[in-house]
Amino acid sequence: MNKKAIILVVDDEHGVRQSFNMVLKDEYNVLLAGTGEEAVDIFTKNTIDLVLLDILLPDIYGIDLLKKLKEIDPNAEIIMVTAVKEIQTAVEAIKLGAYEYIIKPFKVDDVLTVINRALEKRNLLREVTFLRDEVKRYHPFEKMVGKHKKLRKIFELISTISESDGAVLIQGESGTGKELVARAIHNLSQRKDQPFVVVNCAAIPSTLMESDIFGHTKGAYTGATSTTMGKLEIASKGTVFLDDIDTLNINMQAKLLRVIQEKEFERLGSTKVIKADVRFIAASNKDIKNLISQEEFRDDLFYRLNVFPIKVPSLRERKSDIPLLLSHFLEVNAKKSGKPPKKFSNNAVKALTEYDWPGNVRELQNLVERLFTITKDSVIHFKNISISNIGKRQFTESTLKEAVNIFEKEYIEETLEFTNGSRKKTAEILGIHRNTLLAKINELGLKG
Ligand SMILES: Nc1ncnc2c1ncn2[C@@H]1O[C@H](COP(=O)(O)OP(=O)(O)OP(=O)(O)O)[C@@H](O)[C@H]1O
Ligand SMILES: [Mg+2]
């Protein structure tokens, strides 16, 4: 339920204060002030949503008081109350940021209408500001760590895609960094100073989904007590991130398709067409093509979103990044906690590199955080990891030789790919003789 708005009435006439109070007290919390000084005092001590401000006060000129209040809280809406002969001043007040003026004597209905409109504007603004701040708070460390070829390809894609405005579909297992990729695209794009707004398709009940995305007008449905902006509107000129898009029901898929195609929409309960100036980035950890064949996902929506496809690799597919990520998250934890740095022993790194991380980077990040917190020693050993029960999942008990082979194989493979299969260049980069390279290719069963 919305909390009652707080209105401050500033007027030197007792009668006027009381009549405002009578009219407003059922719907709002009303505070009264008879002088400018009193008004400033009340205004400073409370979060006032709206002020009804008489222009002629005994101790301060209304315009000066307006300036003062706007300085203290620029978000409060101020409505000037004036006599006909003061209209010129009222107009001046509007220029200084007052929302509106009303002329005495006034009709109760008119006053209520103006107040409602002002509060509505304030609510919408507050919502936008809140969400923008929220966006900035989230993910304080946006750094994407990794050097594996597959990740470097993703970095390249991010930079190319950020220059355009087409829709993006990011697919990949849970915890691989899909949201990080989406934020990176936004942060590199021209839309970077505008909001990045997340629509969490899996977390919002389907009955609320439509209103969450499109917004609604007051009274659009039972329980819609005020006009509310949807995420599309909040994200105006920015990016909308449709997370877990595969969970969107077929009905909403059709509605979303329409917005992407026509670039416009309406709030629920309204016929006013609103332009949708947003970039869409969608993410899913399911294989959407598969869902299409099961008729759970619309193929036309898929093609609309899949203008730029990105497949984020699992951590298993880029094991050479594991040591980097381990040190990265140790560093992050040390910084965050202000404690001295810690490191993993070689054996620990080896074991963690062999582990196949079904939860991908998120799982690794969580494990490092836990180990950093519970390990007293500045070195985290293999035995510490077993204690902190990484789970029943097995480490392949491989010898050092086997582990080295795994690494060698991956490294040689990558270098070969990098040189487009040139054995000469590969041998040069690796600093070994061509014959040694050939022998390794055979020994490790590489295609070469
Ligand atoms: N390459 C990376 N470097 C550093 N941190 C990363 C990297 N990839 C992912 N992370 C971190 O791992 C966590 C999970 O990433 P993210 O939320 O982007 O995953 P996701 O693919 O959206 O997962 P899900 O499908 O479960 O929503 C985040 O805390 C993110 O910061
Ligand atoms: Mg995610």
Image (cartoon, rainbow, N blue to C red):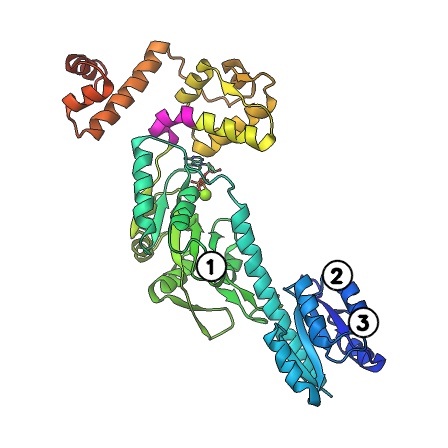
Residue at x 71%, y 83% (from the top left corner): 82
Q: Which mark is residue 338?
A: none
Residue under numbered circle 2: 44
Q: Is residue 79 left or right of residue 196?
A: right
Residue under numbered circle 1: 235
Mark-to-mark CA distance, 1 and 3 = 39 Å
Residue 356 appears in view: no
Q: Magenta residues?
A: 315-324
Residue at x 49%, y 59% (from the top left corner): 231
- Point out residue 95 in the picture as x, y percentages from the top left corner: 59, 76
Badge 1 or badge 3: first in the primary sequence: 3
Tell me the amino acid under the disc marked 2. Answer: Thr
Number of residues whose C-alpha sits closer than 10 Å to that of mark 1, classed few (under 14), some (14–19) or many (20 or more): many
Ligand 1 location (quadrant): top left
Tell me the amino acid under the disc marked 1. Answer: Ala
Please check the rendered image and state whether residue 443 is part of the magenta-colored stretch, yes or no: no
Please check the rendered image and state whether residue 321 is part of the magenta-colored stretch, yes or no: yes
Residue under numbered circle 3: 33
